[in-house]
Image: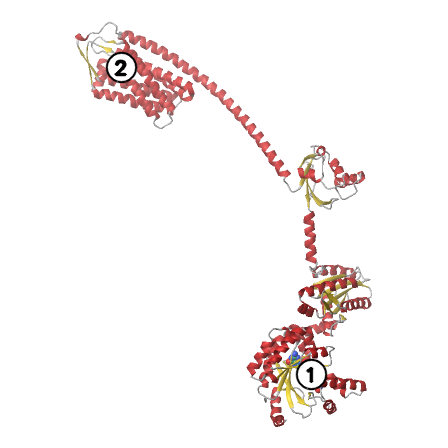
Amino acid sequence: MFRVFNCLSAEHDWRLVMLAGLVCFAASIVAVSIFHRAVASRGWTRSLWIAIAGAAIGYGIWATHFVAMLAYEPGVPTGYGLVLTALSLAAAMILTSGGFGVAVNNSGRWRAAAGGGIIGAGIASMHYIGMWALEVPGRVIWSPELVFISIILGMVLGYVALAVALGRKNRWGTFAAALLLTLAIVSHHFTAMGAVQIVPDPTLAHDTLSLSPSFLAVAIAGVALSVLGMSFVGVLADRRLATRTSRFEQIISELSLARQQVEDSQREIQEQKLRLDTAINNMVEALCMFDAEKRLVVSNERYALLYRLPPELLRTGTPHADIIRHRVMTGILKSDSSEGAAEKFISKLAALPFDAVSSRIDEFADGRLICVTRQPMAGGGWVATHLDVTEQRRSEAKITHMAQHDALTDLPNRVLLRERMEHAIAVTRNGGVDLAVLMLDLDRFKEVNDTLGHPAGDSLLRAVSARLRECVTDTALIARLGGDEFAVIDYVTNPAVEAAALAENIRKALCEPFDLGDHRVTVGTSIGIAIAPRDGNDSDVIMKSADLALYSAKSGGRGAFRFFEPELDELMHARRNLERDMRDALSERQFELHYQPFVNAATGETRGFEALLRWRHPQRGLVLPGEFIPLAEETGLIVPLGEWVLRTACAEAAKWPQEVGIAINLSPAQFRSKELAPVIVGALASSGIAPHRLELEVTETVIMHDSEAVFAVLAQLRELGVRIALDDFGTGYSSLSFLQRFPFDKVKIDRSFVDELSSTRAEARHLARAVVRFAVSLGKTTTAEGVETEEQLDILREEGCMETQGYYFSRPMPASDVARMLRRDGAAIRAA
Ligand SMILES: Nc1nc2c(ncn2[C@@H]2O[C@H](COP(=O)(O)O[C@H]3[C@@H](O)[C@H](n4cnc5c(=O)[nH]c(N)nc54)O[C@@H]3COP(=O)(O)O)[C@@H](O)[C@H]2O)c(=O)[nH]1
């Protein structure tokens, strides 16, 4: 560094050094400004600016070098070779252009370093080729270290200058970059000059073609400054032009942007319109929009199709009235298609409120139902949708019908009955008319269903519905409440007469046989009648009253009708209490069995005992079966109760002598239970009594319910050895046919005939005797029930009756009394 300093201070003229620096700075300012232009330009303009920037700085370096060389006073005369001097200028221009080009065209982070390196190389090339051109009478000695440092200085500072020029393109950036570039050139030059030592040698004189340094320096400086000045002016002009151009370009670009935006929004509007058209044309509803002047604004294809509108009526601005006229007069609507009708319709629509949503149903001539909904629009006018609701309405009507009617008979169901009844009861409140409510259920419907199957049951219910329809007037309503329950309601002015007549008509109609395909069945009906408002003035109360009357009719023997009476309510109450108590009675062991003996008519020997159920009620005392057995049968409690009777009676009989039998009554409900046979077998097995000691008493009623099934069970039990007795013989009309169909072991002549044997009426006496005689003639064991007198016993013996039973011998007694009696009579029994 000392060498460099020494060279500068001792071997250079400071004034010329300053001039060199000035030239260099001017060149740097011009070059950096042009470089910035190059950065802002594109294409060939950029290349041109790069070349000019390179030329400016190349020329600046070259001029600086030679002005600085003028300041150099090596102590010997100097000159420059023409060719090498020119070559140094070319090298400087080309390499610096290259450096600028690399920095501008590259986008990598190393572009400033690469560009700066090349510029440094350009500075060094110019300097050392220029020094090569130096002609002195002496030898030039170089210091390699300083040469190296000079090159590095040029490159590093060149890089920094370029980095600043790229990073800051404003005035201060230009200034700083130019200063750094100047520093790169100047520091390189003077360091490189420090590396030179000229040892005078007069033998090394040069020819006269060399350029004189003073001429060269002045010429260079002058030309350099003027060229650089012109370049600088050019740059400034260009910058201003560029500013204007860029503003113009900006305006153009804003305009084209605006144009683009307009085009985009037009395209968007087009697409929106297309989407809207697609949407409204694909709506399920027909749609139309009218303005405040009632002129068509928009409509969709479905609207045109629905009303078969020609294209001229679909134009925007078509009056609403014209479209309505077309709709009416083409006969699309189910109405008069005259002009007058059209005008009437137009006036009707005009009267619709325009400030609220309105909806109506238009009926088309082809039966379609169109729901038209009008929605007012802000600013007047309306949007209307027209929706085909035919299917929807049909489905709704169907659903409503199904909800209110019975599917099998298509008669109104309980829901509709209740609705109509409420209305009818409201009518009766005005006076002058009453409402008769008839509740009926079919007798023996269950038998038909069970024996012939459900399809037959369904046919029967349909046939019953048809007959009921024939029995009533137009004002009546028939409903099916479920199962075999029906109701009929009708207005009456004289309930006692009209309601009774209606009930009688129905009763008679339903007593007639029904033909169900291959089968002919006879059912019958029981009817309960209540009158509104007398027996209740709301539907629930009146139905309950009719129901109680029906219950009373059924308890009274079926096949009849009964009017509601207030006492029925109390009866029902008592019945409900009885039912509740009976459910507890079995678990609380309140039931007990009494036994009534049946004896050999000839010898008086006890052949066995009939088990008769008793209920020892905690409050009511001993209750007889006639009071609770029908209810137990109705509620199904007879099944567990009957099972208890079977087990208890068999267990009791097991304590008696082997010869003594046990007779047990069976109910129809027990036969409906599949458990009857297993229960009997179980009772026999657990008690250990022989099957032939057990006698099962069945009545006609038991068999009639389902004769085939009952006979099948009885046959099964008879095969086990159990004896089967036909109870209450003579009371039913079908006993004879049953006797033919099943080999009963015993026939029990009903008490009523025995009673008549001692009657004062000869006819009754004869009939009773005839029945007894007939029973005996069947060749089976005959037992006469209800023998109360010796006279009766004598007649029965006379007629050949084998067994007798009745108060004459003994009343039914508790098991403990049976044991005592058997002990007392044991000898007699054994002896017989
Ligand atoms: N399914 C079942 N039914 C049963 C059972 N226990 C009884 N019953 C049925 O109840 C009916 C009434 O029975 P009850 O009140 O016990 O009357 C019986 C006798 O007390 C009565 N009887 C007997 N002798 C006379 C008499 O000389 N005079 C007179 N007035 N009554 C008399 O008859 C009834 C027995 O009749 P029957 O059954 O026809 O032999 C009764 O009909 C039973 O069916 C049971 O456990 N299960």
Residue 604's spot in the image, x, y percent? Answer: 67, 92
Give the label on residue 747, or none: 1
Residues at marks 1 and 2, CA–CA distance in whole angstroms:
157 Å
- From the viewer's perspective, tell me whether residue 63 is left or right of residue 760: left
**Which structural element holds mark 2?**
helix
Callout in the foreground (1, 2): 1
**Which structural element holds mark 1?**
strand
Residue 447's spot in the image, x, y percent? Answer: 68, 70
Foreground pick, 56 / 803: 803
Q: Residue furthest top?
A: 208
- From the viewer's perspective, tell me whether residue 292 is left or right of residue 48: right
Q: Is residue 323 above or below residue 104?
A: below
Q: Is residue 534 above or below residue 336?
A: below
Find out if the beta carbon at label 1 lies less than 8 Å from the nearest ligand 1 atom. Answer: no
Q: Is residue 316 above or below residue 336?
A: above
Q: Amino acid at mark 2?
A: Ile
At x 68% / y 54%, what residue is drawn?
399
Which quadrant holds residue 455? Answer: bottom right
Residue 608's spot in the image, x, y percent? Answer: 63, 87
- Residue that mark 2 sits on: 129
Q: Amino acid at mark 1?
A: Val
Q: Quadrant of the N terminus?
A: top left
Q: Is residue 675 visible?
A: yes
Give the label on residue 719, or none: none
How many other residues sit within 10 Å of disc 2, few (<14), some (14-19) or many (≥20)? some
Q: Is residue 590 visible?
A: no
At x 82% / y 64%, what residue is drawn?
493
Q: Quadrant of ligand 1?
A: bottom right
